[in-house]
Amino acid sequence: MKRYIVTGGAGFIGSALCHLLLSDQETEVVAIDRMTYAANPATLKALEAHGRFRHVEADVCDAQAMRDAVKAAAPDAIFHLAAETHVDRSIDGPAYFISTNLVGTYAMLEAAREYWSGLAPGRQTAFRFVHVSTDEVFGSLGPDGMFTETSRYDPSSPYSASKAGADHLARAWQRTYGLPVVVSNCSNNYGPRQFPEKLIPLMILNGLEGKRLPVYGDGANVRDWLHVNDHAQALRLMAQEGVPGEVYCVGGGAERTNLQIVRELCRVLDERRPEGAPHEALIEFVEDRPAHDFRYAIDPAKIDRELGWKPAHDFEQGLAATVDWYLNNEDWWRSIREERYQGQRLGQAR
C-alpha cells in the first residue's frame, strides 16, 4: 500500500490530486488542511467516499502538529500544496501569505526531514517531497518568450513573493540536508471545485446570477491555462519519477487573454442558459489590479522529455465541461456564495 500526504488537500488542486491518487486501490491519502475560507466541507465528503482517506485539520504553520501528522501517516511522498493563493487577497492582507506560504513551508520541510532521516535506506531513496509552486514567481513576460526551469525569479505581488521564498526554502533543504525535494511551477489551473474568487468560476457564477462580469483593465492580460486534472497527473509523475533537486514547469499550452476567456464563457453560458443571453452584455471593464503582470506562458518541454507528461485536455472542451460542472453542482457552491463570498472586488490596495 502506497501512502501519501497532501497538504491543502481540501483545496482546488489538492483535492484533484487526492482524487487521482485514490483512484489507485493500493493507495492511502492523508489530507492536511486547516479548512480556511477557500476549503469546502463538501470537497472532503467527496474524498471520504473513496475510502482510504483521512483528513487532519491542522495549520501547516504548527510545527509540532506537522511532525505528528507526518509520523502517523508514514508517507512514501509528501505533496505540499497548502498555501494562500489569491493575488488580490495578498494585496489586501499580505501577512497571511507570509505566514502560511513561508513559515508553513518551513514547518513542512522540517517535519519531512525529521521523518525522512529515520527511514531505512531504500525508503529514503524512494521518498519525495513535491513542492508545488506557480509561474507567478517569474514575474511578467512581454509578448514573446516562455518561462522555463531556468527563468529568473522576479515576483510582483505579495502572493508571488511569498511563493518565491517558499521555493528557495525547498531548494535549500534539498541542497543542504539532502531531502529529496522536487519543485514544480505551474500555469493557471481551471476545472471543478475552484473557489469562486478566481476568474473562471467567478465569471460562471456571476453570469448565472445576472451579475456584472468585471474584467481588469482592457482584458489584454494573457494567461496559460492548465486543466487541474492534467496538473494532478504531472504531480503524481514527479513523486514517482522526478529527480531530487530538479524543477519541472507544468503548462497547458493554452494562452488566452482574460477577455477571450470571459467571452468564451459567455458563449457557453448562452448555450446552456439562453434565458440569460447575451451574457456578454454583462461584461464591465474595471480599474486594473496593482502590479498586474501582463503575460505568463510555460514551456513544458522538460517534463515532457524527462517524465513523458503532456496535457490531455483540449482547452475549449475543458472550459465547457467546467461550466457544466458548476451548473450541475450548485450544492457545492451555493453556500459559498451565500455565506462567504458574493463576488465582491478584492485587491484594490486602498
Image (spheres, rainbow, N blue to C red):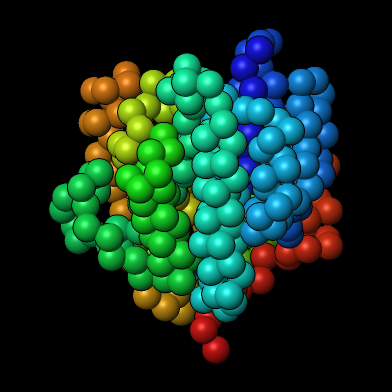
Q: Front-most of 68 and 205? A: 68
Q: Residue at x 58, y 54 (%)?
A: 107
Q: Residue at x 58, y 67 (%)?
A: 99
**Quadrant (top left, top right, bottom left, bottom right) of the N terminus:** top right
| Residue 170, position as x, y percentages in the image | 42, 49
Q: Residue furthest bottom?
A: 350
Q: Is residue 29 left or right of residue 148?
A: right
Q: Residue furthest left?
A: 144
Residue 204 to residue 252: above or below: below
Q: Residue at x 81, y 51 (%)?
A: 334
Decide if residue 274 is in sight here.
no
Quadrant of residue 25 within the rendered picture: top right
Quadrant of residue 248 within the rendered picture: top left
| Residue 66, position as x, y percentages in the image | 67, 47
Q: Front-most of 243 and 11? A: 243
Q: Is residue 220 left or right of residue 324?
A: left
Decide if residue 133 is in sight here.
yes
| Residue 266, position as x, y percentages in the image | 54, 49
